[in-house]
Amino acid sequence: MREPGSPLRVIAVDPGLTRCGLAVVDIAQNRSATLVDVKVVGSANTEAIGNRLAVIDQAVESMLDQYAPHHMAVERMFAQNNTPTVIGTAQASGVVIAAAARRSVPVALHTPSEVKAAVTGNGNADKNQITSMVTRILRLAEPPRPADAADAIALAVAHAWRGGLYGRGLDTGKLTSRRTSSKFPTANKTGSLTPAQQAWLAAEKRGSR
């Protein structure tokens, strides 16, 4: 159970069979973020699918038990032409979501563009921009490598900033609905938001028109 006033601990997963990014981040109520752990796991595409999923399952199970996060954030799969990649991503996502469900850890899904907008203020930011912002936000001595690690960290921060601390942030259908109001209770006081959050608020307003 999370005690009032304590940081929100989020485990975030950038799913994939070859490279699966896993990050645990603590986010305080003042929106400051602290990296707890980050790793990238995976296996070669020559391995049997069961073995490949077992690698991810064991890694996420270990991190869930070790760090006891309050929420899990998973990158939402999006359509692309590479069908085998889509299938592999879906399989990896299912493994980590099931692991969270067994521990009653709430799970949220966020698209890459949502994460980019929340962290950088630009829904089309490239990987270098994401890595740079993650390094600054978490006050890291050096950028996290590889890119999958930075993506997982960004996902954790985006979840907390979008909903974990400022609204439910778990019903992703409503999060993206044009009929709902902003998930920031300070929406009428934009001066209290970070530039990235202000950019997200502006995007919400455009989407409601």
Image: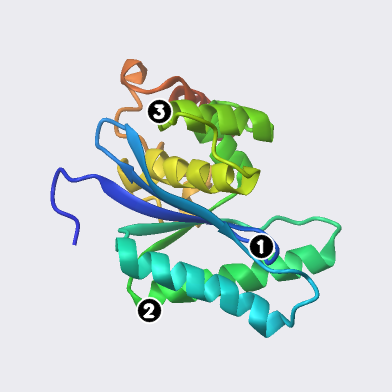
Distance of label 1 from label 2 (alpha carbons): 21 Å
Scheme of colours in the image: rainbow
The quadrant in which the N terminus is found is bottom left
Distance of label 3 from label 1 (alpha carbons): 27 Å
Would you place residue 62 above or below residue 209 in this image?
below
Query: Which mark is nearer the camera, 1 or 2?
Result: 1
Q: Disc 3 on helix, strand or loop?
A: loop
Q: Amino acid at mark 2?
A: Arg
Residue at the spot 58% in from the left edge and 79% down from the top edge:
54
Residue at the spot 47% in from the left edge and 76% down from the top edge:
98
Give the mark count: 3
Residue 69, by quadrant, is bottom left
Mark sitting on residue 16: 1
Q: Position of residue 145 (x, y in %)?
A: 59, 42
Q: Amino acid at mark 3?
A: Arg
Which mark sits nearer the N-terminus, 1 or 2? 1
Which mark sits nearer the N-terminus, 3 or 1? 1
Mark sitting on residue 139: 3
The residue most toward the top is 191
User: Left or right: where does residue 90 sit relative to residue 164?
Assistant: right
